[in-house]
Structure formats: structure tokens, C-alpha cells
Image (cartoon, helix red, strand yellow):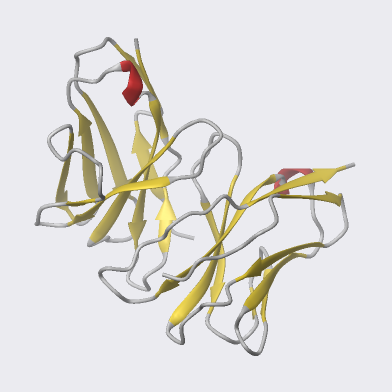
Amino acid sequence: GAVVSQHPSRVICKSGTSVKIECRSLDFQATTMFWYRQFPKQSLMLMATSNEGSKATYEQGVEKDKFLINHASLTLSTLTVTSAHPEDSSFYICSARDRLDTQYFGPGTRLTVL
Amino acid sequence: DAKTTQPPSMDCAEGRAANLPCNHSTISGNEYVYWYRQIHSQGPQYIIHGLKNNETNEMASLIITEDRKSSTLILPHATLRDTAVYYCIVRVKDGTASKLTFGTGTRLQVTL
């Protein structure tokens, strides 16, 4: 199947700093990418849908000014958690949709905010 | 997208077939059934999807009932590495507004 990578896999930061997470589709082009968040022992929750060259669409309750998404190319989307706080600590997972409309997921990024 | 119902957990002996059921009684005619699994602390892995015909690939088989109100994912020879949470999701394919919405899934434990 198609491969999606994320970087970094794990990040620890101080409260108030910003963290950028990259998501890349390695062997296909993705006009649409998605960002999910998963808290311990819970299921994945969709945060936003990212379309190449346009503004992201955020799910209800997700602050667009706090979670900045950029999808500058067909293989790269970034999520920036601005002014991170301990409650933002979570497992962030991206996915990319291929031309056959199947979504493939990255390995996830574990964010810990101290 | 239609809602799905899965048992919260199942056990399976290694080497045996694991049959994971999913109910999707409100599925629409243009909605596909997708299966993903998530091994602990990893991103979900795509397994298989189908519309109404049974499907098989190198990982699993998907059996969809004739009325499409339920389906079964079959792992023919489960191994310890198949221990994971399995998600059954129905969604419209080829729609820009279509999203994968995850429920709570079935936690499959494969044992020796």
C-alpha cells in the first residue's frame, strides 16, 4: 500500500512554544490530507481536512488559530500547534488520500507539552 | 456517513481464523465498507474495502451480506502480530466531503 511519513515521531516541548509536524505522502500525490488527534484509550478524532493550495476545513470545536495547517504541495502538509499547553499533549496522526480515494495513515507523532 | 456497530473485544487463538463482525444497517447505496486496524501506538493501517461484492487481498477477506447491512472481516490465519484494534467504517467514496470517522472498534487479542 501507499506510504505516508510523519516527522518528528516524538516531540517534547515547553508550555507556550510552537511545534510543527510534517506529513508526507512518499509514493503518491495527495490533493487531500487529514489531521487526527488521539488521546489515551480513545479513538481517533478528525481535526481538519487539508486541501492542496487552499485553506483547511476544521471540525467543530477545533481552533484554527491554534492548529495551523499548511498544504503547500501535493506531497506535504504541516500542522503547527501554536502556544502549546499540556492539554495539547496527544498523539497526532495524519493521513493522505490517493487517487483511488483510499486513505493511508502516517505513523503518528507523540506530542508531550511540559 | 452511516454508523457502525462492532463488538468491543474478541479473542482468537494463533493460527485460527479471526472473524470480526460489523453491523451497518443504515448504510446507503453509495457507501463503501472500509476496514482499518491500529496496532498500539501506531497510525491506522488500511486493510480492505468493498461495496457489495466479497473482496480478498493478501491481508484479509471481506464478506458483505447481500442486503449490505453487515459485514465480516476475516483474517484467515491470525498471528500474534494481528493483535490490534480493528475499525469498520462506512463512507461514500470519491466525495470531497467524505471523511473517515472512527468509532471505538473491536480490540482483537490473538493468543498462543
The residue positioned 15% from the left and 40% from the top of the image is A64
Residue B94 falls in image quadrant:
bottom left
| Residue A94 visible within the image | yes
Tag count: 0
Residue B37 position, x and y percent, is 59, 52
Q: Is residue B47 left or right of residue A1?
A: right
Up the image or down, B110 lies above or below A109; here it is below
Residue A10 position, x and y percent, is 40, 24
The residue positioned 56% from the left and 65% from the top of the image is B4
The residue positioned 72% from the left and 44% from the top of the image is B81
Up the image or down, B82 lies above or below A2; here it is above
Residue B73 falls in image quadrant:
bottom right
Q: Is residue A109 left or right of residue B88?
A: left
Q: Is residue A66 left or right of residue B59?
A: left
| Residue A27 visible within the image | no
List the single residue furthest toward the bottom.
Answer: B66
Residue B111 falls in image quadrant:
top right
Looking at the figure, which quarter contains the N terminus of chain B? bottom left
Up the image or down, A4 lies above or below B65; here it is above
B73 or A8: nearer the viewer: B73
Residue B84 position, x and y percent, is 66, 45
Looking at the figure, which quarter contains the C terminus of chain B? top right
The residue positioned 35% from the left and 62% from the top of the image is B99
Residue B7 position, x and y percent, is 70, 56
List the single residue furthest toward the left.
Answer: A54
